Structure formats: C-alpha cells, structure tokens
Amino acid sequence: MPVELVEKKLPGALPVHLVARDGLDAAGLAPAAVAWARANGFSGEAGRTLVVPGENGALGGALFGIGDGEGALALGALSKALPEGDWHFASTPAEPELAAIALVLGGYVFTRYGKKPGKRLRFGLPSGVDAGRVRRIADGVFLTRDLVNTPTSDMGPEDLEQAVRTLAGAHNAEVSVVKGDDLLKQNFPMIHAVGRAAAGAPRLIDMR
C-alpha cells in the first residue's frame, strides 16, 4: 500500500496546510511560505498542491487548496502530488476519517502485470480515526478495483469464483455456486443466456 497511515507521531514529518480560496493570510503560515505561494500563483484553489521549501533548500511542507470548502475525498490527490516521505496534517481535517480513507485510496496502483507500486508516503493519522477500519475499507476498494481493472481474458467466471473463494477463506465466509445448466434448473435463465456462449460456464456466486 503506497500510503501508510501511522498512528504514532512521526518525528520530522512535514506539515500539509489546508488553504481555502484566497485564504493564505488566514492559514497561519510563515511569511516566507506565503510569499512562496504567491510567487507560484497559489491562492488555495481546490485540488492544487504546492510544495514549500524550508531552510537550506530542504522541503518545508506543502499547501493543499480546498477552494470554497473542504471536500475530504479531494485530499486523495495528495497521495500522488506529495514527494515521498513522512507527512501530517497541520490541522485536523473537517472529516478526518474520510480524509484518511481518501489518502489511502489515492495511492492505489494496479500492479497485476508488473507495474511498480511507486513512491511510498507515511502519513500521521488524524486524531480519533480508527486505522484498522480505514485499512479494511481501503482493502475492499482495492480488491474491487483490481477485479474491475483485470481484462476479461484473465477474469472469466472461474477466475471471479476463485477470487470470491479466496476472500471468503480469509474471513471464514461460505460460498455457494450455481453454474452452467444448473442455472436453468434453479430459475436463473438470464444469467445462463448472457454467459452460455463463453468459454467458461456462467455462474451465480453467493458469499455469506
């Protein structure tokens, strides 16, 4: 997972400041950071990230524009925009759990065919957020994205069944499958009609 949420405080983590439109002066930034933002045409427009230099040319933090109001899911853009390293929010987002979910989802990479996961970020978890819950939600979304992104040549009915059985095995769930002509016997004619010409037999997969 390219974005790792860390519950403990990260020494040396750089701050991400959430800046409203035309809100540089109200964001509590150092004068040098405000000057840098203005020199780069940053005014808090929604979705834009600007990395801010610190002392001696090192990174000093980043600004993220929230426009006219914070949309927590938009914070997922930080996962691709920030340089690799340790980060934290300078102030708690309005919807901290949704912000944490967005950060993790924003780092998704489809790696089945060899693409590298890319850079890795560690991000201090906003106060009061359950890291385990965020990871479970992200794992579910990532699995769904992987299934959707896999071409049908590698994700036929039998492959999907195996994916469901693997998931069920990890969570002590039960799986039942109705396939082929048994679909007609159990009154699922439309599933049979749609998939009967495929190389792999059509099926109804039920996980409980």
Image: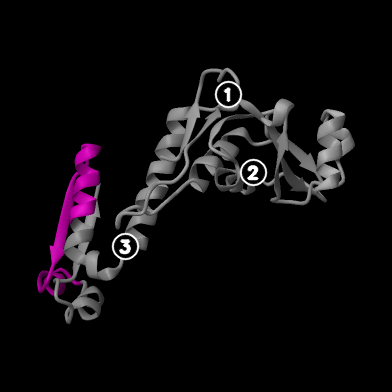
- For disc 1, the marked residue is 128
Query: Closest to the observer: 56 or 30?
Result: 56
Membership of 180 in magenta stretch: yes
Region in magenta: 162-187
SS of the residue under disc 1: loop
Q: Residue furthest right?
A: 25
User: Which three-letter amino acid code belongs to the residue tagged 1?
Assistant: Gly
The image shows residue 187 at horizontal and vertical percentages of 19, 72
Quarter of the figure that contains the N terminus: top left
- Mark 2, residue position: 72
In this orientation, which residue lies closer to the viewer: 126 or 87? 87
From this viewpoint, which residue is outermost toward the front? 56
Separation of residues labelled 2 and 3 (CA atoms): 28 Å
**Residue at 37% from the left image edge and 49% from the top image edge:** 116
Residue 93 in magenta?
no
Q: Closer to the N terminus: mark 3 or mark 1?
A: 1
Residue beneath the point at 23% across and 65% down: 154
Q: Is mark 3 on a helix, strand or loop?
A: loop
Q: Residue at x 35, y 50 (%)?
A: 143
Q: How is the image coloured?
A: one colour
